[in-house]
Image (cartoon, helix red, strand yellow):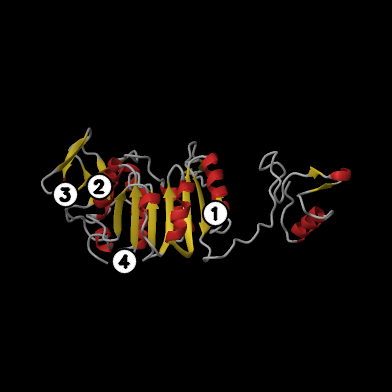
Amino acid sequence: MSEPTGAARRRGPFKVGDQVQLTDPKGRHYTFTLEEGKSFHTHKGAFPHDELIGAPEGSVVRTTGNVAYLALRPLLPDYVLSMPRGAAVVYPKDAGQILAMADIFPGARVVEAGVGSGSLSSFLLRAIGDDGMLHSYERRADFAEIATQNVERYFGGPHPAWTLTVGDLQDNLSDTDVDRVILDMLAPWECLEAVSKALVPGGILCAYVATTTQLARTVEAIREHGTFNEPSAWETMVRTWHVEGLAVRPDHRMIGHTGFLLTARRLADGVEPPLRRRRPAKGAYGEDYTGPGGREQAVPGGREQSAPGKPDGAAAADLTADLADGSPERG
C-alpha cells in the first residue's frame, strides 16, 4: 500500500501531519492536526504539539493547568462524527451495515451518489483500498468541496482510488462493469435505469433513505424495473450500556432511527425475476388493485376468487402450499 493511504499512517509514533484525538477526564474528545511549533489550548491550559511528535500512540500529556489528556489517533467512526459538515453524515452504524451487507471488498469498483460531507466516501475508500475505484457524484459543489477536504484530511492527501464528479448521477454516469452502487439521495428510483446499465450481473444496489415513503417507492420501483431480484430492507438501532460495578443497565439515550437501508442484486441480461411466492396482505395495494394476491372480489353467481383468471380453490391451494413451505399466512 502507498504511504498516503496505507497502514503506515495508522502505525508508529505520532508525526507531523497526524490527526490526534485527545480525551479529557470527562470523556470529551478534541481532534487536531500535529504541527511543529504549535500549541493546543483549552480552558484548562495548553501544551505544545512537540510533546506528542515522536511519542507513541496512547501517551498522556498534561496541560499547564495540570489536566491529563489521553492522546490517540482518531478511529474513522470518531473522525466522521467530528469533521466539518455540509450535509448530515452517514452514521458509523449505517456505514458499517453498508460495508457488510453491500459486500464492499478490496479492489471493488463502486459508484456512490450523494457525497454529503464525505463520511461514507471515507469508509468506502478504506474498504476498497488503493487498487479499487470509487466514483462519487454530488449535485452541490459546496458539499463536494467540504467532502474533498474531509477525505483528504483523513487520508493525508488525495486518494488514488477516488474520483468526484459534481452533477446528477443519472445524467453523468458513464462507468461500466461496476460491482456496487450506493445511493444516498432523495429519489433513488430516478436512477434505476442508469444504475442497471452500469452494474455487472450479480452486482449490488444499496440505497439509503430517510422515510418510509421513500423506502416504499424505491422498493416498488425496483420490483417494476425488472432487472433486480427481490429487494431486502431494514434499519439498525444501537443502544450502549452503562457498566459501573454492580450498576449494569442500558444507557438512557441511544442512537435510534437514522435511515433505512435496502439492497437488491442485478440479474443477468434478459432474465426475468422469479415470481414472489408470498402474496401481500389484502388491501396492501389499495382498493383498485386486481393483481395476484389482491383483495378478494365478487364474481358472477356470488362466488369469490382471490384474483381474476384463477380457478375456484386456487387461493386455498396456494395458501396450503405456502404453509407447507414454512411460510407464514399473509392476509
Which is more foreground, mark 1 or mark 3? Answer: 1
Contact flag, marks 3 and 4 (Cβ < 8 Å): no
Check the image and report above or below for 152 versus 86: below
Distance of mark 1 from mark 3, alpha carbons? 60 Å
Mark 1 and mark 2: Cα distance apart in space:
37 Å
Q: CA distance from mark 3 to mark 2?
A: 27 Å
SS category of the residue bearing label 1: helix
Judge the density around disc 1: few (<14), some (14-19), many (≥20) Cα neighbours within 10 Å: few
Q: Amino acid at mark 2?
A: Gln
- The residue that label 3 is drawn on is 51
Q: Which comes sooner in the sequence, label 1 or label 4?
A: 4
Left or right position of 133 against 39: right
Which is nearer the N-term, disc 1 or disc 3?
3
* CB under 8 Å between discs 1 and 3: no
Element under disc 4 = loop
Q: Mark 3 or mark 4, which has the lower sequence index?
A: 3
Residue 145 in the image: state x and y as whole percent: 26, 44
Element type at mark 2: helix
Q: Nearer the viewer, residue 215 or 102?
A: 215
Q: Which residue is mark 2?
A: 149
- Label annotation for residue 131: 4
Q: Residue at x 30, y 52 (%)?
A: 164
Residue at 28% over, 43% down: 141
Q: Is residue 120 left or right of residue 202?
A: left
Query: Mark 4 belongs to which amino acid?
Result: Asp
Residue visible at 51% across and 54% down in the picture:
263
Looking at the image, is 108 positioned above or below residue 232? Answer: below
Task: Say which label, 3 or 2, has the lower sequence index.
Answer: 3
